[in-house]
Image (tube, rainbow, N blue to C red):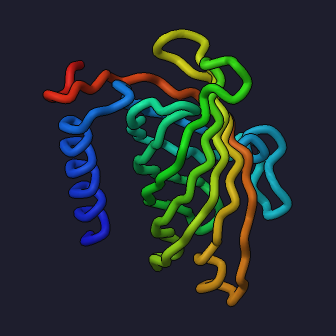
Amino acid sequence: MIFKKNSILLFITFFFSICYINAQDLITLSGHQDFKLLTIGDERGNAPGTLNLITTLKHEATQQKLGFYVFGIDYEKANIKDGYERYSGFVGYTFNFVFNDPKLKITPAINYGKIVRRGKTSSSISGTIQTAYNVSKKVRLSTKFQYKQRSDLKIAYNLNVVRSSFFVGLEIALFETKKTGCSL
């Protein structure tokens, strides 16, 4: 219960703080599904079509020569055995002028959060590389490749495990920010 209250407080603080800083003029919301669980399942008994969805709220900072800083929050939920949830925050840098195509964005990021599984909570870090391509002003096709410390497996099975996952999804521009506030 305390963790959920802290997550709500984090979201509110994040939202109001981004409204008053000079920004890339974009707040995005994205959804990404684990591609392997969607298409073929896994060797742990999860059938094709198993939900493993990451929802991300992201703020893009001021454009620089090669790109811009990003930060935000993630919520991941997987319908795997014993359930799985992860709440986290991240910071990264988006390169958008690497291949002379500003529609293509490549974002390495580091992420810290909490995994909730089997009624227990544990800390976890991950590294992510996200690629995104603008198909319109408001919509991007996107992929995420993630290496994640699975601290829930350390608690359950005493295994120090880092797992990789590949996600596909969409990123939607919610609204633009201005130095004087937010506009919807």
Name the residue at 63% across, 58% down: 127
Residue 26, image x, y percentages = 37, 26
Name the residue at 30% across, 59% down: 7
Q: Quadrant of residue 164?
A: bottom right
Name the residue at 23% across, 63% down: 5
Q: Quadrant of residue 169?
A: top right
Q: Residue furthest top?
A: 136
Q: Quadrant of residue 135?
A: top right
Q: Residue furthest left?
A: 180
Q: Is 80 placed left or right of 5 in the picture?
A: right
Q: Quadrant of the N terminus?
A: bottom left
Which is nearer the eye, 167 or 94?
94
Q: Quadrant of the C terminus?
A: top left
Q: Residue furthest bottom?
A: 158
Which is nearer the eye, 59 or 113?
59
Residue 136, image x, y percentages = 54, 10
Residue 110, image x, y percentages = 56, 58
- Residue 130, compared with residue 97, is above or below; it is below
Residue 65, image x, y percentages = 53, 31
Name the residue at 26% across, 64% down: 6
Which is nearer the eye, 21 or 154?
21
Q: Residue furthest front?
A: 65
Please tell me how many numbered marks the rendered image carries: 0
